[in-house]
Image (cartoon, rainbow, N blue to C red):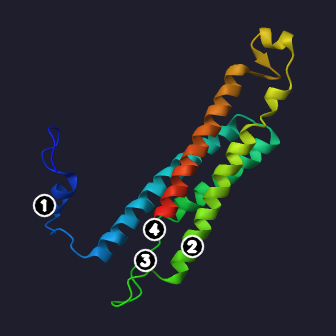
Amino acid sequence: MSNAICPMPLGEIFRDILGKEKETNPVKKLYDDAFKADIGRWIASCAVIGLAAGIISKNPGHEMLAASAYNLAVGSLHFFVFKIPVSPQGLNNPKPPMWCNLILGISSAMWLAALIVVFVMRENIDAYEDSSLEKRRTGFVGEISTGAVAMLDNLAIACGCFGICSFLFCVYQ
């Protein structure tokens, strides 16, 4: 599988540089794919940390503050738990240990709760409620401008989307 930009796939390039042969063991391939999904979850966790911190820095309402704090906590937990060292239970049993499945189940539930909370609380931004026609004409809603409210909304949507990515990586593993 080559194309005009890269005549040789990157996997083959790294395999040639490192002197490794192509992996033929299907169990090893599955564990390698799970490791790649773990790297993707880690990258999405980094994005959630930054976006949740951005939401907190904008002084949102209490509900949005709680939702972004929960997302920050879940992202931070998954940032430091980069890779769970997993190998098959034995030569005859290719399944991962039971504790690994338990941790992945808890991790998936945490990410699912995080993305639901941030999307639900996004609808309850306090600045939308306190407005009058006079303040709207000047471009201000409450104490902050409408641009800051839109930015807070965009940060919440992006944080939720990266939460979805992390959840899907957990499910894939």
Q: Nearer the viewer, mark 4 or mark 3?
A: 3
- Decide: few, some or many residues near mark 4? Use Cα within 10 Å; few <14, some 14-19, many ≥20: few
**Amino acid type for the residue under numbered disc 2:** Ile
> In the rendered image, which residue does mark 4 sit on?
83
Label 3 residue SS: loop
- State if disc 1 and disc 4 touch (CB < 8 Å): no
Q: Where is residue 143 drawn, in percent x and y?
A: 81, 23
134 sits left or right of 157 in the view: right
Q: Earlier in the sequence, mark 4 or mark 2?
A: 4
Q: Where is residue 138 drawn, in percent x and y?
A: 77, 9
**Amino acid type for the residue under numbered disc 4:** Lys
> In the rendered image, which residue does mark 1 sit on?
16
Label 1 residue SS: helix
Q: For residue 125, what is the image quadrant?
A: top right
Q: Earlier in the sequence, mark 2 or mark 1?
A: 1
Q: Where is residue 6 drawn, in percent x and y?
A: 16, 43
Q: Nearer the viewer, mark 4 or mark 2?
A: 2
Q: Is residue 9 above or below residue 132?
A: below
> In the rendered image, which residue does mark 3 sit on?
86
